[in-house]
Amino acid sequence: MTARPEDPAPNPHATEAEVQAALTDNKLAQVLYHDWEAETYDDKWSISYDERCIEYARGRFDAVVPDAQLPYDRALELGCGTGFFLLNLMQSGIAKSGSVTDLSPGMVKVATRNGKNLGLDVDGRVADAETIPYEDDTFDLVVGHAVLHHIPDVELALKECLRVLKPGGRFVFAGEPTTIGNFYARKLGQVTWKITTNVTKLPFLSDWRRPQAELDESSRAAALEAVVDLHTFDPSDLEAIARRAGATEVLAKTEEFAAALWGWPVRTFEAAVPESKLTVGYRMAQYKAWLGFSKLDEKVLRHVVPRQFFYNVMITGVKPGASAK
């Protein structure tokens, strides 16, 4: 349940020189940014491995594969991050065993540690999604969450997914930014960050301000984030990419419109203020608000708002061959 000994060690504190080098080397940027994020990523995005996130992960899967024959025997997660998607899917009964991969050694380390702590049958490897280091026809399921937009050649990565899938195996990717959704989310985040960091300079709000060194480090990470986020997607275009890669039964769905308009300013505010200010009561209130806006999206807005205006897009497809699960 650990990363391989020969995998490179994490580098969680990139120097200014390394950051500058990464501005012209995308895959170095991917490693530095995600190594920097690895140990704090779950807290930053309110990720957990309890019923709340199990239900969320399973909900994303069921939205595009509502009638799967479960469980899958062996699953692979690309760009696993801290293991959020696969580990929670496994806890919900989607797969018996799994492998997590990421270009970032830090993320693989955290994901395999999380898997071990949960008692799941999971191993990990540092790996590039464009050259997946597994044999043909190895997995029954490939999943990923918020990973395709980091991959330089998305079509090549999907071809690799199909290669390592058994005939009839399925891929499911969720949490990818739409082109329109990404535009308004970024703008909301930038405005919120500027307002929060300026207002907390006022003397009577100084205890709401993070130390300047932390804010500076966040700004360096944000500079890398602009490099590592390579793509946004129109849902129809993403479906076309999956079909060109060779997938059948391709389907894209979108979610989060009102929830994104609410959630992005909230997340940005939380990143700009001290952790001690974010009480349990505050977090629960924000979570309940997000659930309310998500229900509004699902029950009302998805019927009247074009799918490309929602923030997240999910995509699934099947490797030709035996009947899909």
Image (cartoon, rainbow, N blue to C red):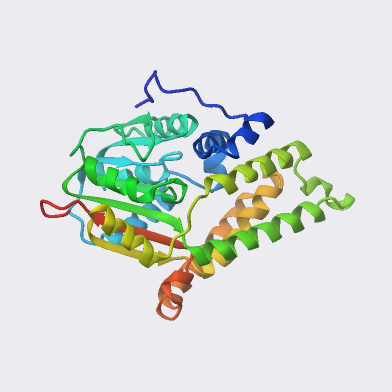
Residue 61 figure quarter = bottom left
Question: What's the residue at 46%, 32% (across, down)?
Answer: 110
Residue 78's x, y, as percent?
36, 42
Taking the image as shown, residue 302 lies to the left or right of residue 44, namely left
In this view of the protein, can residue 262 be seen by the observer?
no
Residue 181's x, y, as percent?
52, 65
In this view of the protein, can residue 108 be seen by the observer?
yes
Residue closest to the far left: 322
Question: What's the residue at 75%, 36% (across, down)?
Answer: 213
Q: Relative to residue 16, is residue 193 depicted above or below? A: below
Residue closest to the far top: 5
Taking the image as shown, residue 266 lies to the left or right of residue 148, namely right
Quadrant containing the N terminus is top left
Q: How many marks?
A: 0
Residue 304's x, y, as percent?
44, 81
Taking the image as shown, residue 70 lies to the left or right of residue 44, namely left
Residue 303 figure quarter = bottom left
Question: What's the residue at 49%, 30% (across, down)?
Answer: 106
Q: Relative to residue 188, is residue 126 depicted above or below? A: above
Residue closest to the far bottom: 304
Residue closest to the far front: 24
| Residue nearest the observer in this picture, 286 or 152 | 152
Residue 311's x, y, as percent?
49, 64
| Residue nearest the observer in this picture, 182 or 279 | 182
